[in-house]
Image (cartoon, rainbow, N blue to C red):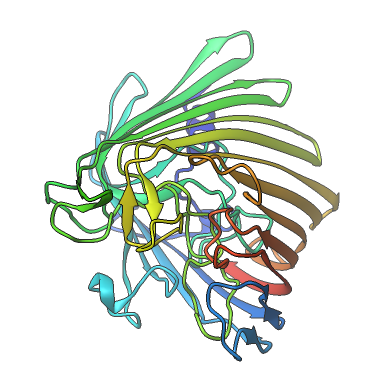
Amino acid sequence: MNKKIVFIKTVMFLGVPMLPFGSTSAAQFMDGKLSINGAVMQAFQSPIELEGAGRVTTADDEASAGFQRFRYALQINAEIDETWSVFAELAEEPNDLSTDAGFDPFGIHMDLGWIQADFNNGVKARLGTILSTTQTFLRYSDGAVVQSNPFIGNTPVDMITAEEGLWLLGAKDIGLSTDITWDIGVSTPSFLRDHTKSAGFNMQARGTVNFDNGLSLGTGFFKTNGNVDCSGGVCSRVDGAVVNSLIGLGDGDNYAFATRGPSQVNHVAIIPGIEAFIWQANAQYQKGPLLIHGFYGQAKDDYAWQDTGGKYRPISGNFEKVDAEMEFYGLETKVDVAGSLYVAARYTASENKTGDISNDNSLYRWQLAGGYHITDSTLLKVEYAKQKEEALSGGQNVNGTGSAEWDGVSVEMSLVF
């Protein structure tokens, strides 16, 4: 297996951010040492109404139809020499940016970036903003970079974020038409920087075995070691700030309600991510026009969310010394119908196993989507999504006394160049 194939499989199975279409047309400078790719995306949403015992109850919980905010990104690759290179993605992502985090929500910022060293044995070392995740088959929408995802939204159980750290990646042909990819990483649990006593370090490891018959098996592990102070049964960070481990929250979705805008209110939030351990097993079959991917995982923490009344409530700002636990799983399939047209379906769910919680503890999302490649660089997607969150599911839309659900249709146009 030549180095080019190994690199391509590393890209596919380790989630290296690349534009899947049109990347060969990158603008090149400095005798080819510097190349720039771009991506843009615009979406349209039908009315989405939150029904049931919603956490936020106002007369404006039903959003009218309308266009989402335009997003764009530039990916810059600089080949310094045979060993060293630099990658940076500059992106405008209103889902991720806020003035509370020190960002200008109308500016462009570095979303990913690292210094990379390529060694002769096929190992790559990256120092900078790394992907922190337990997933090994990434089909994920991140700002304007959306064409690797056949759907418009992500899943409510995506264990993925970006943090500052060191990342080692490798790929190797082991014979018998089989190759393996792997990566390990250590990071500070922050997209910016966090040197407080509460922060600790996050550690991750992933591995995938890829067979020539189209079957691939992968697994991922993630460990946090943060620190909190507990008094009177209520725990908080040493410095009083919000816990900054984002591994259990996922990336912001396009689905929006009228009163909350582009916030991360559609993902499950069961573990705070203080002293947490997460593992995920993945299996994928991809042959010809058919792709099938299934996964199962568990996440545990020594601490659980708690509101001021001592009851369970996600994203409350307070914690208690009670074991938090969740199970998450999903199944998705994609079929290329004819030429540039495809259809896809996805089901994902999670169950809250914290403490004595055993009823009304599930969250579900169904997604049905279709896509049409107008050109190699232009993709039009349509998706129907429906989500239900039970009272104690850890869903961020429920108030803890009843279930809530929503559904809606989105349309997305994206281009890469």
Residue 86, position as x, y percentages in the image:
27, 49
Asked which quadrant contains residue 37, the reply is bottom left
Q: Nearer the viewer, residue 19 or 247?
A: 247
Q: How many marks?
A: 0
Residue 20, position as x, y percentages in the image:
57, 52
Residue 305, position as x, y percentages in the image:
39, 52
Residue 87, position as x, y percentages in the image:
31, 51
Looking at the image, residue 44 lies above or below residue 293: below
- For image coordinates 28% across by 25% down, the residue present is 119
Determine whether, in the image, residue 275 is placed left or right of residue 399. Answer: left
Looking at the image, residue 355 lies above or below residue 141: above
Find the residue positioned furthest to the right.
338
- For image coordinates 26% across by 70% down, the residue present is 101
Q: Nearer the viewer, residue 139 or 230?
A: 230
Residue 127 appearing in the image: no
Find the residue positioned furthest to the top.
176
Asked which quadrant contains residue 108, the reply is bottom left
